Image: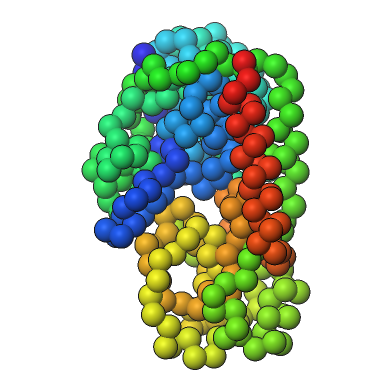
Amino acid sequence: MSLTVVRAGLLTTIQDGGRWGMQEQGVPVSGAMDPFAMRLANLLVGNRAEEAALEVTLLGPELRFDGDADLVVGGADLSAVIEAGGGAIGIRRWIPVRVPAGASLRFGERRSGARAYVAIRGGLDVPAVLGSRAASVQARLPGLAGRALRAGDVLPIANRAIREPRRSPRHGLEDVAIDSIPAAARFIWGPDANLFPADEVARFLRATYRVSTASNRMGYRLDGPVLHAEGSGRLLSEATPIGSLQVPPSGEPILLMADRQTSGGYARIGTVISADIRIAGQLAPGDAIRFMPCELDEAIRALREQESALADLGASR
């Protein structure tokens, strides 16, 4: 069984848990921009949490299925519908649905968020490159690992499901998904925070930034108050975690995301905590965000709660 890409959309890529363990060789991690949404959608449809799924950005594709398929659409609300037999039926996010053979999945207007995830029961049967099926457009890896989907692409559907889809209308996690996200993300102070004068730090904490149009899966350039670190020219390049808030000489903060470069030497004022990467992952150009400092204990607790909720869902039948 397979699906055919009728229309590709703005940016539709295959993503999974990412290409870990290759950063020292200059290969980006990649993976889902909103890993929580992707993992939740996979678990609901009966897959492993980090199975390969489709990441749909803002303007979605049209996908035609040549056989019956179960899928879950999660993440952003991009008005997903199933077209079959001459009619169209809107589908709810986070609920497994059966798509009959010959039907199409397509998307409409953006209602909330920026990235939807289509998790198909069994996963996508595309080759893994360096241990992952995640696409990294900037890295130019071979095949679908190095590009977005195009009209005419045919994606075989695998048989790697580990359980039946969870068809309960409520699973207890949708309330911590996209609709409840505030336009604020918690962060831990970075190793170079002491290079920023006190008045600059105060300005940063008060500021509301907007995602610039000069943004992509590598990172977001943020429009708002500029910041300047003292002595940043003496910094050495170091590894870059997802969520790192770096400040180049121009003073415009950059929030590093899934396709980030593997190292960088800009001053790091902070790092968005792992539990709140999902917030950043749902931003589009023009969206506003604020940053709130938190302690390491809070960051660890938030991540443990998130992981525990997903683990409980994955263990349930």
Residue nearest the viewer, comparing 231 with 105: 231
Q: How many marks are shown on the rendered structure?
A: 0
Question: Quadrant location of the C terminus?
Answer: top right
Residue drawn at x 70%, y 64% is 295
Residue drawn at x 47%, y 10% is 68
Q: Residue furthest left?
A: 142
Residue drawn at x 42%, y 54% is 259
x and y percentages locating residue 22 in the rendered image: 31, 52
x and y percentages locating residue 261 in the rendered image: 38, 62
Measured along the vertical axis of the image, is residue 216 above or below residue 35? below
The scheme the figure's colours follow is rainbow
Residue drawn at x 45%, y 40% is 17
Residue nearest the viewer, comparing 226 with 278: 278
x and y percentages locating residue 52 in the rendered image: 42, 32
Q: Residue furthest bottom?
A: 231
The image quadrant of residue 174 is: top right
Decide if residue 239 is on the left or right side of residue 178: left
Residue 47 in view of the camera: yes
Residue nearest the viewer, comparing 232 with 302: 302
x and y percentages locating residue 200 in the rendered image: 67, 84
Question: Quadrant location of the N terminus?
Answer: top left
Residue 75 in view of the camera: no
Decide if residue 68 is on the left or right side of residue 24: right
The image quadrant of residue 87 is: top right
Measured along the vertical axis of the image, is residue 29 above or below residue 90? below
